[in-house]
Image (spheres, rainbow, N blue to C red):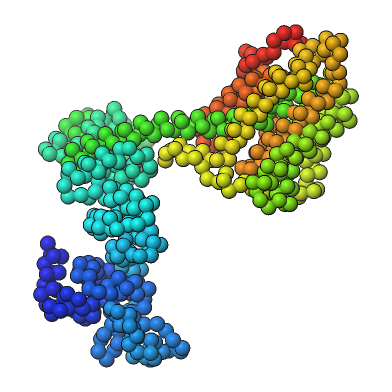
Amino acid sequence: MLRTLLACLTLLWLPLGAVAQDLQAFLQSHRSDIADPSRRTIGMVIDDLVALDPPGTAAFLQAWQAKDIWVRADDGLFFRATRKSGNLLALHDIATGDRVADTVPGDALTQVKPNGGVRRLIGEALVRFQLSDPDIALRRDAVNAIANGLDRSQIVPLAASIEGETDPDLKARKEQLLTFLEARFASDPADRISAIEGMAGALSIEVRAILNQILAKDFEVAPTLPEGANIATILTPGNGLDRDTAYAALVTAGLARERIGADILRARLEAHIEGGAVGGVPVARLDTQPARERAYAALVAEGKAAPLVTVAAVDAALETHVFYEVYTEPDSTITDAARAALDQIETRVAFSQVADLTLDGISLASIYFLAAIGLAITFGVMGVINMAHGEFIMMGAYTGYVVQLFIPDYTISLIVALPLAFAVTFGAGVVMERLVIRWLYHRPLETLLATFGISIMLQQLAKNIFGTQARPLTSPGWLDGAWVVNDVVQISHIRIAIFLLALMFLTLLLVILKRTRLGLEVRAVTQNPRMAASMGINPDRINMLTFGLGSGIAGIAGVAIGLYAKVTSEMGADYIVQSFMTVVVGGVGNVWGTLAGATLIGFLQKGIEWFNPSNTLAAQTYMVLFVILFIQFRPKGIVALKGRAAGD
């Protein structure tokens, strides 16, 4: 009311022409406030200027905020100014921006220097003009400024700017912010409820924050519940409300006396020591709490201290008062609508979190499947514990990196890198099998030690060639970003691509194993090597090709993993443990078992990380413990081999 009255008086004082259109006249009427502004007094002046909105107001506010406003000493007129050489200034009309003077000494003018608080107020006023500015960047800045500090004064200018907004995304953002403002500040309760109900379909943190602000509560205590208050919850001491906290609230509200603790009791007794005694009790006997309480009771009887608050008095005080939480919003219909909307949103958020966790589990399972399927083939057919399997993944990733050095087009380089990584690691696997593995069949300990040594050798070789720094393996532009279902559920395009790649390899391996002669021979050697040899199959050749196939698949997995993970000489070590766990849990030598193991390991790890997101190392530890327990009850894995090999 006072603000409106002052604005009206200002309008009456100004000449009629100045009220309608003269910015300079308005500034002259508030010269002292504008020339030497303070945050305490300038707010009303800015509001009146924005309400009048004479031509040039927006440009003046921008110049004022940028400290480009100057006052001429001889007549007190305001100008916009730009510095020229030395101490000279070029003056521009405050409203139109037209050049007034080219070279004016700076000594003839005084610069207006608003402080930080005043500039913030000017910025808030500028938002109203910038919402409809032709420059979309200024409109975005204005919308962001509103989002950072919602205020009821923004409703009218924001609503007025929506109809003329040409950018669809910015228009949608304005409509969303208008809904937020109406939910918080609309004068008509029906409008607020309508806005709140319209927010119930969204899951964003912003929406939940607005609803939580509407549902903000204060903790109160009183002899009885106040009439007409919008009570949220009635609390019971000892049942959801700590009794000490409840009594402390009574003391703070002046409804009960403060309890005297042991330290305070001792201090008060020390203050009344007379002749080596307190209240007739010798100091030497005050070594127990009951003795100190008797001495203090004597002081109370003598009128030298206030009575102690007994347990019975505390119980009585708690029983004769009511403790409750009251909504800061007095209208219960609005809080009921907000509570219903928030409950609906939280239910949808919970389901969305489950869906998001499921997608994460599928994504991780795809990665583990790609990393482990090659190991499952070699381990299942040949019984070789290949500790260098992770290094074949590393070799595939580095192959992709080298390809990108020669082919800058990331899409083409990826198309080239996948088969090339298979060829490189297939060849490396064949060489390793011919030179080392073939001499160590049926000697698992020696095989483990030999492949572990090869693993260290390959890591060091990679460090010598590529160095110790992580190398980039850049994904194509069409793999950037993520598939966003809603504000909770989203998954990156790279992980979707890895899932599709895993699905493709699953299909390809099933076709090879079930529909080709090589697959028939591999299955025969897996089931019974001696019987396969008697049927004309060369187990030695099959072992070589199988080891090369498993190594080649690991190379392709390295390219896929390198698209989102760091490419270093040690990257294979990050996946070797998970690969072995996947193979053991799923079932040795079985494609479906590997898929089942990867799914179980991936989902279980994501579930553990969800319960303890700050410690991923703990998830790895729990996974190892799970695998140890699992193989105690099912040593052959989820999908065990059938036939004669099952007994080997």
Tell me which residue sits at (37%, 39%) in the image: 203
The answer to which of 260 and 597 lies nearer the viewer is 597
324 versus 585 height, above or below = below
- Quadrant of the rendering where the C terminus is positioned: top right
The answer to which of 455 and 392 lies nearer the viewer is 392
The answer to which of 41 and 222 lies nearer the viewer is 41
User: How far across and how far down the image is residue 485, in percent?
Assistant: 44, 37
User: How far across and how far down the image is residue 41, in percent?
Assistant: 23, 70
User: How far across and how far down the image is residue 186, in percent?
Assistant: 20, 49
The quadrant holding residue 49 is bottom left
The answer to which of 481 and 630 lies nearer the viewer is 481
Q: Is residue 643 visible?
A: yes
- Quadrant of the rendering where the N terminus is positioned: bottom left
Tell me which residue sits at (15%, 79%) in the image: 17
The quadrant holding residue 210 is top left
Side of 564 relative to 513 (left or right): left
User: How far across and how far down the image is residue 289, in percent?
Assistant: 34, 33
Tell me which residue sits at (57%, 44%) in the image: 479
Side of 65 relative to 538 (left or right): left
157 versus 377 height, above or below = below
Q: Is residue 585 visible?
A: no
Q: How many marks?
A: 0
Tell me which residue sits at (28%, 63%) in the image: 128
Side of 16 relative to 193 (left or right): left
Side of 242 relative to 488 (left or right): left
64 versus 549 height, above or below = below
The quadrant holding residue 392 is top right
